Image (cartoon, rainbow, N blue to C red):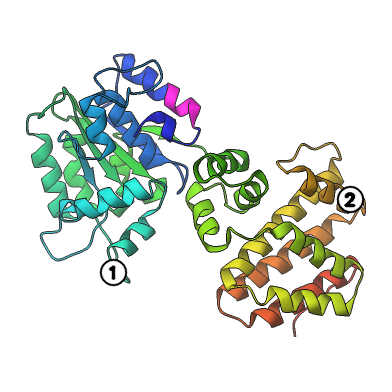
Amino acid sequence: MQFKEVINQQRVKKHLISLFHSGRMPHALLFLGKEGVGGLPMAISFAQYIFCENKIEEDSCGECPACLKIAKLMHPDLHFTFPSIGAKPNFSRNYLPQFRDFVLQTPYAGAFDWLQSIQAENKQGNISADECRDIIDRLNLTAFESGYKIQIIWRPEYLGKEGNMLLKLIEEPPENTLIFLVAENEEDILNTILSRTQKVLLPPLSAAEIAAALHDRLGLEERQAMQIAQVSDNSYAKALYIYHNSGQNDWMPVLRDWFNAIFTFSPLLTNAWVDDMAKNGREQQKHFLIFAQQMLNHVLRLTLVPDSELPLIEEELNFARKLAKRQLPFPVFQHMQEAIQKTVYHIERNAHSKTQLFFLSLQMQYLIKGGKLETV
């Protein structure tokens, strides 16, 4: 995996390359960023850059024997540790073939998806004491092919107190041994481990960056890619999930019809819209409502600052500007957002969606008139 395969994060890539060539490379790096921003792809790409025999200015060559092996996650000096399940002794290597396939197919996916892929179901994955001992043993061996040995620990949050077994190794590893930890939640990592690592912070991806990746990698049209990106919570993994579950829908015409029914206070249009929307699955309904929330956020920004630059395609921007001209008060936007969020909450918990959508539409109409419709 090369740096160019990691979505954006240009500042981080330059920092890592500079760090490697500085002669002051830390023994242990903590790649820290929320799910879907590319922590694991970044760690693998950096490992490939280090192992590469013919480095170019900003990336590994992608063609030398070392690069070809890491492209398959099969370099003998690159080791992986990750959450797993099973009876003792519980080693990550028991699931290594499945983990390779999982990462190669879905490099931005999270630990929950990984554990479900190995049928963990309700079992909690962990990184066991057996695995910690195995890490110590293998990193004390001589490198097979490269001048370096690199250990990637994916999701060190799954280390319990057993993680203290690794403290000496992290602080004083064997010569030319590097340890990369890839985490999402800093507060769930042992403080004793945190204090021995240097952080590499990966910022959230912007909607524009995610939309560009969807366009380039999946061939999505700009309109569809941007709609998905806006509701992805800055996560490429979530964007892919949305695409595979409701990505074929164009939410803009649906939103226009809904707002038309709401602002004209038409019972016929409202009933027709609710009937049509209720035919969609719950995931699709939820994603539409999140899209509506995002659009209201844009409208509010235009209401307060008319010249705001927004990450919207022209049709959506014109719609938002038209709605902003109504100059709805800030509390109205606030109550609309709350009403939509409550509806998402109930739909996620299998409430009758048609009833929820109809009640939400009535709430929106009351709010526009300056009132508020509450449940009893």
310 on left or right of 202: right
Amino acid under disc 1: Lys
Image quadrant in which the N terminus is located: top left
Viewer-side residue, 66 vs 235: 66
Provide the secondary structure element on which disc 1 rests.
loop
Quarter of image, res 138 = top left
Please name whichever residue, 345 or 213, is drawn nearer the observer in this view of the structure: 213
Q: Which residue is drawn at 77% across and 55% down?
A: 296
- Rate crowding at label 1 as few (under 14), some (14 to 19) or many (20 or more) other CA atoms within 10 Å: few
Identified at 77% across, 74% down, the residue is 273
Secondary structure beneath dot 2 equals helix
The amino acid type found where label 2 is placed reads Lys
- Residue at image position (21%, 52%) is 97
Seen from the viewer's position, the closer of residues 161 and 343 is: 343
The total of numbered circles placed on residues is 2
Task: Mark yes or no: residue 367 visible.
Answer: no
Q: Position of residue 119 (x, y in %)?
A: 28, 67
Image coords of residue 139 (percent x, y) = 13, 36
Give the residue at mark 1: 123
The numbered mark at residue 356 is none
Find the magenta span and give its range: 9-14
> Which sits earlier in the primary sequence, circle 2 or circle 1?
1
Above/below status of 182 relative to 119: above
Seen in the picture, residue 174 relative to 258 is either above or below; the reply is: above
Question: Label 2, on which residue?
Answer: 322
Q: Is residue 235 magenta?
A: no
Residue 72, given in percent of the width and then of the height, sits at 25, 40
Determine whether, in the image, residue 367 is placed left or right of residue 57. right
